[in-house]
Image: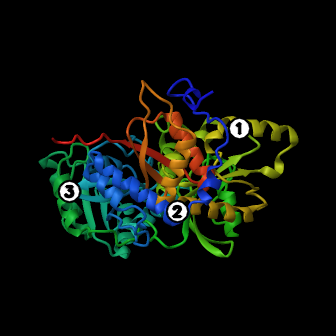
Amino acid sequence: MSDSAAYAGEGDEYVPQGEDHIAERLGTITDEEAEQRAASLLAGLEDYDLDEDDARLLAQRDEDELEEEDDRVPPVLAIIGRPNVGKSTLVNRILGRREAVVEDVPGVTRDRVSYSAEWMGREFTVVDTGGWEHDAKGIHARVAEQAEIAADAADAIVFVVDSAVGATATDEAVVRMLRRKKKPVFLVANKVDDIAQEADAASLWSLGFGQPYPVSALHGRGTADLLDDVMEKLPEFSAAGGLVPRGGPRRVALIGRPNVGKSSLLNKLAGSERVVVDNFAGTTRDPVDELIELGGRTWRFVDTAGIRRRQHMAQGADYYASLRTQSALDKAEVAVVLLAVDEVLSEQDVRILQMTIDSGRALVLAFNKWDLLDEDRRRYLEREIEQDLAHVEWAPRVNISAKTGWHKDKLVPALDRALESWDKRIPTGKLNAFLGELVAAHPHPVRGGKQPRILFGTQASTRPPRFVLFTTGFLDPGYRRFITRRLRETFGFEGTPIEVSMRIREKRSRQK
């Protein structure tokens, strides 16, 4: 049976025939020989129509990306005020889209939630906060704490007051808190729907933040003037921090569905009860950064709210949990996905894994409560892993107990392997030698009388590794997956997603 007959349709898997010993063959090719071959293939690309983007990609090959520079973070604007003054409505108005959850119930927004915004061509981040309550108790105390944290992390603050109600004792407490922060504060008198109500706004001069901005967040009245003035005070980049500078402690997101043991694991790693742990699923509502000494090094762990339902179905705190998990992934370099072995792998688990893959982060699977596993459950679990986790078989697996700390020392080697793969760059010569040997042993099936060829390959980026193949025609998805699989087998890439894309290029027509 020939390779061209190895599978029937474009969506099927490509099944190579016979052994090829590619790793051994690559070992016989010196780096100099590999570079010479790659240079020859690159010269051959001159016969093909390439665009400016192609030229840029080919020019940067083998150059290390400037990974040591700090991430430049857009400035941060925090929206703060007591419950039900219309903060989320104002956020939506600033964004020009309905993203912040708005319900006519005080205190619906319980978490700090960040959104990317733009005004007059400038990018900035808007942080929507829960209502700040003076002397708050219970969950309101947490909300107040989050608002204060948001103020600390902001470059400027919009303080929203209900103009129809006027300044309350709570508003006066907010004023005292904000004065301590010594940040630019813009006082917004919300719910000023027409000129007749502007007199209500004027009474707020007494709060000491200058002239109040009369605004109707619901109708948009006055928001443009507010934003024009905000832009003058916001710095070009955030002075408050934002993402951790590159080159600092490696950033790890702990994610998983609610009550899977994320907070217990973080506490065990940190050696203290620093995260609220409760048997009620979903206790953790905000990611909390924690610097932890592990394996003789410092790591930055982010503990995240669990994901409970599909995002479009989630409401209130669940909706924010999903957003915050995505935010933590955006901030992290590697994700530890916790899976509880005493429960059947669920659709939620698979979806959280897909979020991690889609975010391009390195991945470690941590199977929690392993000490509770009996033989019967172990057999079923292996079957579930085979069926539901086959697409992440490349991720390192660690069996742990978050409660007792059993095997927590196994996390560091797994994290190191995943991050090393995430950062890995294959020299262009070595990559093209690999592709040459692979295609010689297993050519792409003939389609419609034509056989697409791979002209040249280059690694476009790391974090995660992305490869671009210049080809003469479309490579079947099954064949691309085969290339991806063999890249893993040959070069490692344990614990990182890798992406293989193609650029189909035609021969340049020769002018007579």
Q: CA distance from mark 1 to mark 2?
A: 28 Å
Dot 3, crowdedness within 10 Å: few (<14), some or many (≥20)? few
The answer to whether one can see residue 480 in this image is yes
Dot 2, crowdedness within 10 Å: few (<14), some or many (≥20)? some
Given contact means CB atoms under 8 Å apart, are the residues at marks 2 and 3 in contact? no
Q: Is residue 471 above or below residue 329?
A: above
Q: Which residue is mark 1?
A: 386
- Amino acid found under the numbered disc labelled 3: Gly
Is label 2 in a helix, a strand or a loop? loop
- Amino acid found under the numbered disc labelled 1: Glu
Q: Quadrant of the N terminus?
A: top right
Q: Which residue is mark 3?
A: 121
- Amino acid found under the numbered disc labelled 2: Asp
The tag on residue 198 is: none
Q: Is residue 402 above or below residue 485?
A: below
Q: Quadrant of the C terminus?
A: top left
Q: Quadrant of residue 181?
A: bottom left
Q: Which residue is mark 2?
A: 423
Q: Position of residue 337 (x, y in %)?
A: 62, 51
Q: Position of residue 95 (x, y in %)?
A: 29, 49
Depth check, front residue: 83 or 434: 434
Q: Position of residue 131 (x, y in %)?
A: 42, 55
Does residue 105 appear left or right of residue 437 in this picture? left
Closer mark to the observer between disc 2 and disc 3: 2
Is label 3 in a helix, a strand or a loop? loop
- Residue at figure coordinates x 82%, y 38% from the top left: 379
